[in-house]
Amino acid sequence: MFESIENQQTIKSPTSYTGIGLHTGKISTVTFKPAPANTGIIFRRVDLPDKPEIPADLKHVTCLERGTNIGIKEVKVATIEHVLAAIRGLEIDNIIVEVDGEELPVADGSAIEFVKALRKSKIVEQDAERKYLAITKPMSFSVPERNVDVVVVPSESLKITFFIDFDHPNLKPQYTSMVSLRNEFEEGFASARTFCFVKDIKSLKAAGLIKGGSLDNAIVIGEDDMSDPEFQELKKLFGFKGELKLNEDKILNPEPLRYYNEFVRHKVVDLIGDLALLGIPLKGHILAARSGHKTNIELIKKIRKLYESEILKAKYQKKPVKGVVFDNEAIKRILPHRYPFLLVDKITRFVAGENIVGIKNVSTNEPFFQGHFPGHPVMPGVLIIEAMAQTGGILILNECENPQDYVAYFVSIDKVKFRKPVVPGDRLEFKMRLVKSKAGMTIMEGKAYVDNELVCEGIFKAKIVKK
């Protein structure tokens, strides 16, 4: 279900932040730029030829080890969760995020420096309605082996309740709740820093990670029985010059905690950033226990799967129509076909990667009836097949980032059978089911019905090609 009560937003002018990458240890600059309505969040690698772009979308997630990373083929952008949290936390819908390296800066380990950078550029309203994905019924998600439980229930806005329990003597269980993204994110959550346990540092270093990590950009939780040689080893590892010891919060950082429950608040920041990969703002109350990036993404995948049809409606369907996923105008935003060769009137069902149902109302005014046949009008079988192929094309073109830039070429049609003539006044219903998809080649099973009676069937093989 979608609701729209306000307009989309972007920023007025470019704004930048420069800093070190947490894992690569390399300096990079991230520059935020305005983007037109309905663009979404786009990452752009300006250090590479042709400045390739990667939309912030679930389908581009590549790795979730110690952060959220996205990529298309060899082009990658790493550790994007805090930037995404700042963008979504400030309710910015459309923005270009340019970066001159593979990893975004870690800043101080929180989202606040990116919030400050975005605030330097005024946030402006755009002439396009913002769409929300509203959770309409309770759903749950569990990963028993990781002791993770998540429940999502309907809510008039995004709310997050989070609980953590690491079973560590220096990090007691913590709980927090954010009931208003607009009123609480910037002051109550954006400054919460990322954290790790001192016992994990050596293994992270050995794995080639946290090359840019320091006490300036992460909270390090210590052990009570740490010896002086261990402190000296840590100082050498990070090039730390000052005195290293546990403070009253049982952390190695000289700076005190920013919130009494800063650790769980940072988990909320991570979740807000990961939620941006859904591609549309969410209205729902998320109650999460011990969730991290991996389980956040699994949850978002589940939400997207359940609401895929509604998300696609928001992308292509300008005005909601009861019982319709795509009307004729929305179909024309996906398919290149036009009159008199656009043979699908509307789509009534769409399950991404699985199946689709299209409708064609066969009118006596169809141009082909003039010659097929005079005095005995019958819809040509080849056009029934074409209409089925167009319906299937909508299903498979959805897998492309910009469907309007691609076309589905059908390379073979097998086992075709015509069961009954189609005549003026009939209402054709096309049911296409994806059987197999690999390396840009897809196989679909198609059936056409009139009044629930099978009139045509076949197996369709197609290849997606860029125009």
Image (cartoon, rainbow, N blue to C red):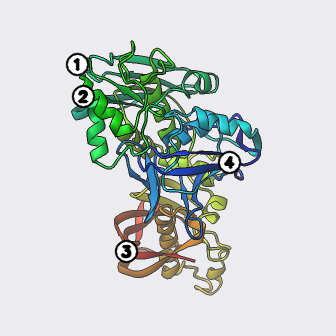
Question: Which of the two marks, 3 or 4, is nearer to us in this view?
Answer: 4
- Pick whichever of labels 1 and 3 is earlier in the sequence: 1
> In the image, is 213 to the left or to the right of 427?
left
- Pick whichever of labels 4 and 1 is earlier in the sequence: 1
Amino acid type indicated by mark 4: Lys
Badge 3 vs badge 4, beta-carbon distance below 8 Å: no
Q: CA distance from mark 2 to mark 1?
A: 12 Å
| Element type at mark 4 | loop
| Element type at mark 1 | loop
- Pick whichever of labels 3 and 4 is earlier in the sequence: 4
Q: Which residue is mark 4?
A: 319
Badge 2 vs badge 4, beta-carbon distance below 8 Å: no
On screen, 76 above or below 389?
above
Task: Say which mark, if any, is on residue 458.
Answer: 3
Pick the residue in front: 195 or 32: 195
Amino acid type indicated by mark 3: Gly
Q: CA distance from mark 2 to mark 4?
A: 67 Å
Question: Which of the two marks, 2 or 4, is nearer to us in this view?
Answer: 2
